[in-house]
Each structure stands twice: as structure tokens, then as C-alpha cells.
């Protein structure tokens, strides 16, 4: 929220430098993110340079136009004389379109020779120094300024015309200079989301007193029916209070210059005096208001006194809002209605049929309190974020409903010439309840770790407008002010004491008791180990949305016919109903995911538009609807008797593109294939020290036939891997190259991870390397052959690697050749060639016996 200091000073005196004030506010919880200096010199820290534009007190002044004459050599230029209260008026040339021949008496901003201004004829903000020059033959050394030249805005179409009461000769920095604090308002500081709210914080932090309007009265209550309107509320929980004031015979016109400037500096666009006043009160006092064209309400009531009813919307009810959009409502929306239907969405936006226009003469000022949860929900569903909805969505105390509206009515009287009706229409079915908190010095010491005197605590709380009474020895009865409904317990009061006392003053102390034992998080540690292994394999982790759409995940299947077999829906797909989201952020994200791959492929497709290669993985949970008997985690909370969904952990991989990126060194840029993906999975299994793992060919509706496998541990499948089916790849608009995917049940995978494992020393004895080529039947798996070789070789066989697969002449059509490299090594002695030959012969005999292998001779 942007807070102009000049506006802040209407409510409280600023007695310390602005940068110190910003530090105090930040330490108290109102983080000042930026300080903007408008015309005012910014403090320059040692070693830094101030690049902002300050308005020179001696050279940039409030001036008065004395006369406007034609330029002898240019029809579009004028010669003006401007008085500035110091000697003779100065003469200059201007091309401002809002200055006409014969004009005089207007108050303007005069910059004398030597002034530093922004160049209005160049893009951006480039500082120039005003020098004497001749413009079409006429000497000119001064300038009447536009907003851009002063850095107020980028407006350069005309010069600034000041109000008639602007004092001639006053340094413009004194008249319009300002400092704007950009304050971050967190949800727990909703009470400070106004200039008055920040002023209350400043007053408490600096020991000053807040100034309020003379007629400020938060205890005033009116009647639900007056001579100009009747107010009805169907559900006090949705609308605890609704009030209205009538201002007659207003004149719609632009707001005064200073009010417009305040709104602009606070981030609001001026519209007209009535609308600007409602925005001015909202920013200044934190209470959103709405102005109705009262005559439109009367016309909708057939000339009778209108009745305003606040109720829940009917399903399918419609209304056109001020932004021209036709809105359709649901029963949880709050509507402000009359006898003909909706005239506004409570707390969010009014209807177009009753908006204030240039023809408006009578204004009904609405001020109300609405259920903040409903406001948040409607704001999200209707996509109508606004300053008003933000404030309503954080809660506003009902006691603060009327006083700001009376300020607005008074401003409409003064700035729009209206007359304020004396009656207050006010339906208040759910009065605000006052709460009190019991506080002891023991609480302060035990929780905050400080020991201030009870007088100091009392002073701090009274500076925050709390009512403090003695409640026994070393105890207080604390009543928060009516605008602090967020304070309802001891901890809330202690937080206020700590903020104003100063967090930085709280001493650091060591815990007196022994530290509790630190229990490890085995599940997280195992996950991190998996991440480390995948990172070492060149994979990059991503995190995708947990939200998706059922049709999005169905796209993973090449053809729906593939799901009708006897095996049902294969992992990682699921036949369970999706977990629906009650209030989705978009229709495309209406359910919780059942697989990681769908959203990962979105990321891969996006990246492959700009990159040649992706190697991605994600570790996350999926959400599966529980079936009867699956509520094994009975400790989880349940909602309306329905168990929470299962949330198993999954690991998914996506690879595509060349094996290595091109660099100045030689690199393997051939496309990755199934075996690259298999290698990553093998590295993962080895890094997790999982024993008894194997790969088996499989078929899967999302994978390319013949290029798919499942990972088995202990004979049980824990996931699938393979090349994506071409039809699925095309749906994701992926490049015409192999896209390799895998998804595993991470819980099942990590359940076999060995926390403790045997580490063998590196043998210092030489390795004997031998190759062996075997002819086997086509249906014999290479992995089975490798396992038999490994088992038969025993402890002396260090490694077995398949390096060649051959089919073709002179081999029979039903046979193939598998070639392996065997490495023999002993940990405690030198192996001889004869030792290796014996082991090799043993391996060949077993393979002949169990898989019908024969040794290939050439």
C-alpha cells in the first residue's frame, strides 16, 4: 500500500526523519519496501549518489499568470508573463495547449533559469538544466511546467494549473512535495490497510496522538428505515451491518487538484468528485463505500421509497457490473438487491444500472460489513480483485461502518455542493462484542523473555488505544479498541507489547532445559538420497502442479481400446475416481493428479521448443480416492465421514534429445534411446543399494511396443519405463524423436533401500579380462544370461557387461549371439589365466545346461 506522508501528517505528527520512521515501521511488522521522494531531497547515504530530482526551493515556485500574448513568429507558441512574488514578472515562451491568448490569473508552476527538470520532449526521465535560449527569435529563460518535467507523472500535454488558492511565491516543494512509503500489509495487519491505520502505528511507535475528525463517532447507531430508504438483511451472518446516507443535489465534476494528487500517489485513478471521495475515504480510513445514483433506485421502485435487501444470490441470478460484464451468481454470493433484483455484489462491485454518472444529482452512500469468507470466494470465482475486496476479504469491524461514511458525506457536501440528509439508515442485527484479556507479568516474562515494569506495559498498550485496568497484583485487564477485533487472547496482547517494545530489544537467551532428542526423518532422508543419485546422473528436478484435468491424463493412452484388456488399467494410470477440487483456479486444474507424467510432459514440451535436450525428474505425491477397506491410515482426520485420499509418493523421469550437449570438445550427440533411460534407472537402483532388481519386457498403452519394460524388485513390479508411444508424443506436440519416460512407486522402491551395506576394498591385484560370445534362442533374455554368469562366477567375477547382440547369418533365424565382457579379480592374491579359464569353463557348462547356450567360435 502506498502511503503519502503528507496525507499521513493529517492524522499524526511526524517527529523523526522518514528513513528512521520506515525502520521503526518495518521492525514493528509494517515492512516499508520502498521510499519514493517526490520533489523532496532524498537522504544520501555515505558513498552513494542521489539520482532523484529534487525541486529547488529558490527556482521552482508557485506562480501566477499575468498575461498571455501571441508569439510574433509562431502561431502555436505563446509569450507569457508570470509573477512569482519576487520583483518583476518573468517573460517566457510556451507551447502549452491549455494556455490561450488573453489568459491571466491562473496559478502555475514556474521554473527559473538554472532549474533541474526532466526533459519533457524525451522518452524516459532524463534530467536537464534550464538555460536561457531564443525560441523562434524570442528570448526565454524560464518555464511553466508540466507534470512530466517535475516527475509527478508522464503527462506532458499541458502545463499544471494549480488551485486558485495556491500561494504565489511559495516553493513548490512546500506546496506539493511529498514522500511516499510503499508499505507491505500482511494479512495479520489488516487494521493498518489505510492511512489512518498506519498513522495509529506511527503514533504508538513515536509517542504521538492520532487526530480524528471532530464528529468521529463509532458508537452511533441508526434505524433500519428512514424517509429515504428501508434496509432489510435476510442473514446477519452474511451481512452483520448495512448503513446508508443520502446526499442531495450534488454536482458531478472533477475533484480538486490536491485530492487527485493524493489518490494518484496512493495508486488510484481519479474519476469524478463523488467516486473519488469514496476511494479517498477507503484509502484514508480503510472503509470501502459505494455510491448509488439514488434517483435510479427510486425509478426502479416505481417512484416509491426504495427497499434495499441484502441476501444470498439465487442460483443462476445475473447482473451487469460496473465493468460492463454480465455476471452469473451462485447461492454463496452476497447480493445487494432492490425490488427488481441485484444492484451490487456485496463488498466487491456495484451494478451498472445504478452507477453514478454525470447526470447524477442525488447520491445514496452505502457502507456495510460483509462476511469476509464469502467475499474471498466470490472475488476468486468472479475474477474481480479490487482494493475494496481486499479490505473486506480481511475483515472490517462493524463498529467502523458509519463514521467513515459520514466523512464521505461531509466531503460530498464540501466538494460537490450537496446537502446531507440528517437521518442515518442503519440495520445492525449482529452488534460487535467487546472482549477483554487477562494479562500477568508472568505471561510477559515466560513468553517474551523480558521483564518490563507494569507501568511500561500499561503505557505501550494505551499508546495502541487499549483500555488497561488493574486486575490484582501484577495483573491487568486489557480491552482492545473497537477497531481491533483481531485481538482476542493473551498471545495477541503479548505480540502487541513485543512489537512496540522492540523485537530488537528482546535479549537472546539459551534454553534452560535439555534439548529434546533429534529424531531423523527416514522418509525424507531416503528421498534426498534418490535426488542426489539422479542429480549425479545428469537429471534436473522440476516441481509441477498437483492439479490437472481428467482428460489431460487420459491423453497418456495411445488408444482407449488398450485399456479394455484383462489386466485393467496399468500403473501409473488409475481407474479410481478423481479427487475433485471444490474451488479450482481454472477448469483445466479441477482435480488432483493421479500420475506425475502428464504435467511433466507439458514442461518437457515447453522446454523442447527452445532447447535440444531435456533430462527431467520429479518426486511428488499423487492422489487416489480410497476404496472400502483402504483406510489403513486411521490416524488421519476425516471430513464429513469421507476419508482423505491416499497420497503415495511417485518418481517420474522424462528424457529426450542428444546424449550430450554440443560443446567445443567432442561429444556424443546421437539421440537418447531406451537404454539411456534404463542406465539412469540402473544408476538409481545401484545408488540406493537395492538388491534383487531386474528388468522385464512389458506392454503399456502409453509406451512404444517392444520398447517398454517394468522394473521388478524381489519379483514385484514397482514401475514402468520405456519410449513414449508415437501417438501420445504427437498429442503433446513433442519433437519427432524418442521421448523416454518412466514412473515408479517411490514408496515401494525406497522400502527395499539398504541403509547398511557392505563396502568392498579395491583389490590391489590385477584384473583378468575375457570376452565370451554365446549363441542362444531368441526368447532367452540377455538379463537372465547375465544373472547366471554372475551367480556362477562367484566372488572372483568382478563384473559382467553385455557389449554386443548379433542376429543374422550365419546364425539360424531363431537364434542370436550375446557377447559379454567378464572381469576376474581376487581380493587377496594374483589370479592366473588358468584360474580364469576354469571359471569361464564352469560358466559355459551351466549356460549350456540351463538355457541351451553354445559357445560361439567365430
Image (cartoon, grey):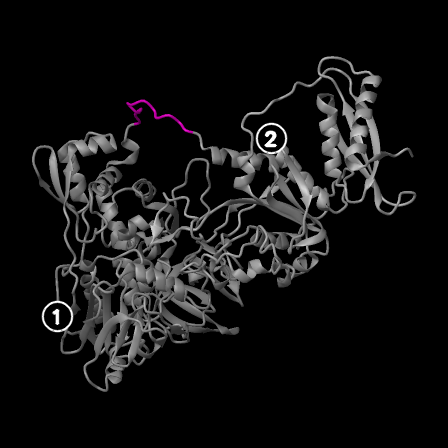
Q: Which residue is mark 2?
A: 689
Asked which quadrant contains residue 283, the reply is bottom left
353 up-or-down from 826: above or below:
below
The Cα atoms of the two marked residues, 2 and 1, are separated by 78 Å
549 horizontally vs 290: left or right: right
Residue located beneath label 1 in the image? 223
Q: Residues within 10 Å of mark 1 (few under 14, many from 20)?
A: some
Please say if 272 is above or below 5: below
| Quarter of the image with the C terminus in it | top right
Left/right of residue 367 with respect to residue 156 in the rendered view: left
Q: Nearer the viewer, residue 715 or 347?
A: 715
Q: What's the magenta region?
A: 508-519
Q: Is residue 475 above or below residue 637?
A: above
Is residue 89 at least partly visible in the picture? Answer: no
Coordinates of residue 177 in the picture (x, y in percent): 34, 54
Q: Nearer the viewer, residue 448 or 363?
A: 448
Mark 2 burial class by Cα count in 10 Å: few <14, some 14-19, many 20+? some
| Helix, strand or loop: magenta stretch | loop
Report the side of 237 relative to 593 (left or right).
Answer: left
Amino acid at each position: 500500500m502506498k502511503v503519502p506522508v503528507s496525507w499521513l501528517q493529517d492524522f499524526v505528527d511526524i517527529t523523526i526523519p522518514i528513513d528512521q520512521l520506515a525502520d521503526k515501521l518495518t521492525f514493528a511488522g509494517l515492512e516499508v519496501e520502498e521510499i519514493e521522494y517526490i520533489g523532496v531531497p532524498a537522504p544520501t547515504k555515505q558513498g552513494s549518489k542521489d539520482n532523484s530530482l529534487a525541486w529547488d526551493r529558490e527556482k521552482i515556485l508557485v506562480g501566477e499568470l499575468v498575461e498571455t500574448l501571441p508569439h510574433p513568429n509562431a502561431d502555436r507558441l505563446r509569450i507569457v508573463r508570470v509573477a512569482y512574488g519576487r520583483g518583476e514578472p518573468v517573460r517566457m515562451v510556451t507551447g502549452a495547449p491549455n494556455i490561450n491568448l488573453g489568459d491571466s490569473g491562473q496559478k502555475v508552476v514556474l521554473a527559473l533559469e538554472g532549474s533541474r527538470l526532466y526533459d519533457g520532449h524525451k522518452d524516459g526521465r532524463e534530467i536537464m538544466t534550464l538555460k536561457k535560449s531564443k525560441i523562434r527569435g524570442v528570448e526565454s529563460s524560464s518555464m511553466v511546467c508540466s507534470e512530466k518535467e517535475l516527475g509527478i507523472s508522464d503527462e506532458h500535454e499541458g502545463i499544471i494549473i494549480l488551485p486558485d488558492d495556491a500561494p504565489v511565491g511559495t516553493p513548490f516543494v512546500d506546496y506539493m512535495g511529498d514522500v511516499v512509503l510503499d508499505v507491505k500489509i500482511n494479512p495479520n495487519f489488516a487494521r493498518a490497510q489505510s492511512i489512518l491505520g498506519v498513522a495509529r502505528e506511527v503514533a504508538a511507535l513515536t509517542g504521538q496522538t492520532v487526530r480524528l475528525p471532530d464528529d468521529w463517532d463509532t458508537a452511533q447507531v441508526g434505524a433500519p428505515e428512514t424517509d429515504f430508504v428501508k434496509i432489510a438483511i435476510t442473514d446477519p451472518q452474511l451481512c452483520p451491518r448495512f448503513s446508508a446516507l443520502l446526499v442531495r443535489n450534488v454536482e458531478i465534476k472533477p475533484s480538486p487538484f490536491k485530492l487527485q494528487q493524493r489518490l494518484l500517489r496512493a495508486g488510484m485513478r481519479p474519476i469524478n468528485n463523488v467516486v473519488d471521495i469514496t476511494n479517498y475515504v477507503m484509502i484514508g480510513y480503510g472503509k470501502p463505500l459505494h455510491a448509488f445514483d439514488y434517483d435510479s433506485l427510486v425509478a426502479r421502485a416505481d417512484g416509491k421509497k426504495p427497499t434495499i435487501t441484502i441476501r444470498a444470490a439465487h442460483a443462476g441470478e445475473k447482473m451487469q457490473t460496473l465493468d460492463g460484464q454480465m455476471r452469473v451468481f451462485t447461492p454463496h454470493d452476497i447480493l445487494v438487491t432492490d425490488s427488481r433484483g441485484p444492484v451490487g455484489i456485496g463488498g466487491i462491485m456495484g451494478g451498472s444500472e445504478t452507477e453514478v454518472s454525470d447526470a447524477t444529482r442525488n447520491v445514496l452512500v452505502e457502507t456495510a460489513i460483509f462476511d469476509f469468507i464469502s467475499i474471498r470466494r466470490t472475488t476468486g470465482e468472479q475474477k474481480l480483485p479490487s482494493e475494496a475486496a481486499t479490505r473486506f476479504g480481511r475483515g472490517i469491524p462493524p463498529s467502523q461502518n458509519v463514521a467513515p461514511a459520514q466523512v464521505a458525506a461531509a466531503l460530498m457536501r464540501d466538494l460537490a455542493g450537496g446537502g446531507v440528509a440528517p437521518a442515518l439508515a442503519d440495520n445492525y442485527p449482529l452488534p460487535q462484542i467487546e472482549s477483554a484479556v487477562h494479562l500477568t507479568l508472568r505471561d510477559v516474562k515466560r513468553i517474551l523473555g523480558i521483564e518490563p515494569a507494569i507501568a511500561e506495559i500499561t503505557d505501550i498498550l494505551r499508546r495502541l488505544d487499549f483500555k488497561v485496568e488493574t486486575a490484582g497484583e501484577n495483573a491487568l485487564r486489557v480491552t482492545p479498541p473497537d477497531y481491533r477485533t483481531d485481538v482476542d487472547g493473551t498471545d495477541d496482547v503479548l505480540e502487541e507489547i513485543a512489537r512496540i517494545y522492540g523485537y530488537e530489544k528482546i535479549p537472546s537467551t539459551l534454553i534452560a532445559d535439555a534439548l529434546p532428542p533429534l529424531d531423523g526423518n527416514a522418509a525424507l532422508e531416503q528421498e534426498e538420497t534418490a535426488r542426489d543419485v539422479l542429480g549425479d546422473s545428469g537429471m534436473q528436478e522440476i516441481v509441477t502442479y498437483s492439479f490437472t484435468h481428467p482428460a489431460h491424463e487420459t491423453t497418456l493412452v495411445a488408444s482407449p481400446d488398450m485399456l479394455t484388456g484383462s489386466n485393467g488399467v496399468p500403473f501409473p494410470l488409475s481407474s479410481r475416481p478423481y479427487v475433485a477440487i471444490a474451488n479450482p483456479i481454472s477448469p483445466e486444474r479441477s482435480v488432483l493428479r493421479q500420475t506425475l507424467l502428464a504435467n511433466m510432459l507439458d514442461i518437457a514440451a515447453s522446454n523442447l521448443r527452445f532447447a535440444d535436450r531435456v533430462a527431467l525428474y520429479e518426486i511428488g505425491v499423487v492422489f487416489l480416492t480410497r476404496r472400502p477397506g483402504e483406510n489403513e491410515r486411521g490416524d488421519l482426520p476425516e471430513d464429513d465421514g469421507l476419508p482423505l485420499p491416499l497420497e503415495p509418493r511417485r518418481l517420474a523421469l522424462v528424457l529426450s534429445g542428444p546424449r550430450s550437449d554440443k560443446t567445443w570438445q567432442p561429444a556424443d550427440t546421437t539421440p537418447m534411446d531406451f537404454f539411456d533411460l534404463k542406465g539412469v534407472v540402473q544408476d538409481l537402483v545401484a545408488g540406493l543399494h537395492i538388491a534383487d532388481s531386474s528388468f522385464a519386457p512389458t506392454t503399456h498403452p502409453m509406451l512404444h511396443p517392444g520398447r517398454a519394460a517394468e522394473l521388478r524388485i524381489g519379483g514385484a513390479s514397482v514401475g514402468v519405463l520405456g519410449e513414449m508411444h508415437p501417438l501420445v508424443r504427437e498429442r503433446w506436440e513433442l519433437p519427432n524423436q524418442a521421448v523416454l519416460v518412466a514412473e515408479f512407486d517411490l514408496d515401494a522402491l525406497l522400502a527395499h533401500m539398504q541403509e547398511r551395506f557392505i563396502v568392498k576394498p579395491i583389490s590391489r591385484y590385477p584384473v583378468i579380462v575375457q570376452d565370451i560370445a554365446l549363441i542362444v534362442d531368441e526368447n532367452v533374455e540377455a538379463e537372465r544370461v547375465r544373472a547366471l554368469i554372475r551367480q556362477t562366477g562367484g566372488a572372483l567375477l568382478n563384473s559382467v557387461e553385455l557389449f554386443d547382440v548379433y542376429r543374422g547369418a550365419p546364425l539360424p533365424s531363431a537364434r542370436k549371439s550375446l557377447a559379454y565382457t567378464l572381469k576376474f579379480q581376487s581380493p587377496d592374491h594374483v589370479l592366473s589365466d588358468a584360474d580364469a579359464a576354469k571359471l569361464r569353463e564352469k560358466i559355459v557348462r551351466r549356460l549350456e545346461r540351463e538355457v541351451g547356450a553354445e559357445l560361439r567360435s567365430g
